[in-house]
Image: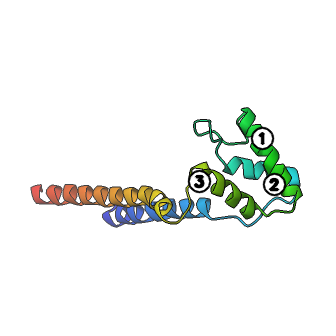
Amino acid sequence: MSDTTRRLVWLIVPVVALAVVVVGLWPREQAPTDPEARAYSLAVRLKCPICAGESLAGSQTDLAKDLRARIDQEIAAGSTDEQIIDMFVAGYGEQILLDPPSTGWGAVLWLVPLGIAIAGGFAIYGLKRKQQDSSEVST
């Protein structure tokens, strides 16, 4: 494999990986219209307050059942998904959200892995470059 091809591969692979991550995290606007599906999609986004990292949808505690019933009531009353989420955040704080918000400290949580990946890419590039330089000097 030629030096140019290697450099091209080292450039393309991180770009493709970043594109896959961005597409995977891109918000989708298609909210379910069926009340049962809406209730489930909301319950999956909310954490059970007394369970260790388990969603309301997966928890079988009495509190989780009560909170799922509350979601059903709010949907029947005509509340939007955001209003329901805001109601739970107001009552339990942002720790009830399974996905951290993309503002404030939540943004840091989303950006730290990206920063680590970029730093790792630079480190690998630097090591490869150093290895190539040392092999060129020794020949």
Instruction: Identify the residue at the far front of this view.
Output: 91
Mark number for residue 43? none
Is residue 55 or residue 87 the one in the foreground?
87
Image coordinates of residue 1 in percent, x first then y, are 36, 57
Give the residue drawn at x 19%, y 58%. 130
Crowding at dot 2, Cα within 10 Å, few <14 / some 14-19 / many 20+, comes out as some
State whether residue 58 is above or below residue 131: above
Give the residue drawn at x 17%, y 60%. 133
Using the rendered view, name the quadrant where residue 51 is placed: top right
Q: Amino acid at mark 1?
A: Asp
Q: What element does badge 3 sit on?
A: loop
Image coordinates of residue 64 in percent, x first then y, are 72, 39
Residue at the disc numbered 1: 66
Is residue 14 or residue 5 the one in the foreground?
14
Please say whether residue 1 is visible from this viewpoint: no
Mark number for residue 93? 3
Q: Say whether residue 109 is left or right of residue 74.
A: left
Q: Amino acid at mark 2?
A: Arg
Q: Say whether residue 17 is left or right of residue 87.
A: left
Q: Amino acid at mark 3?
A: Gly
Is residue 20 or residue 134 the one in the foreground?
20
Please say whether residue 66 is visible from this viewpoint: yes
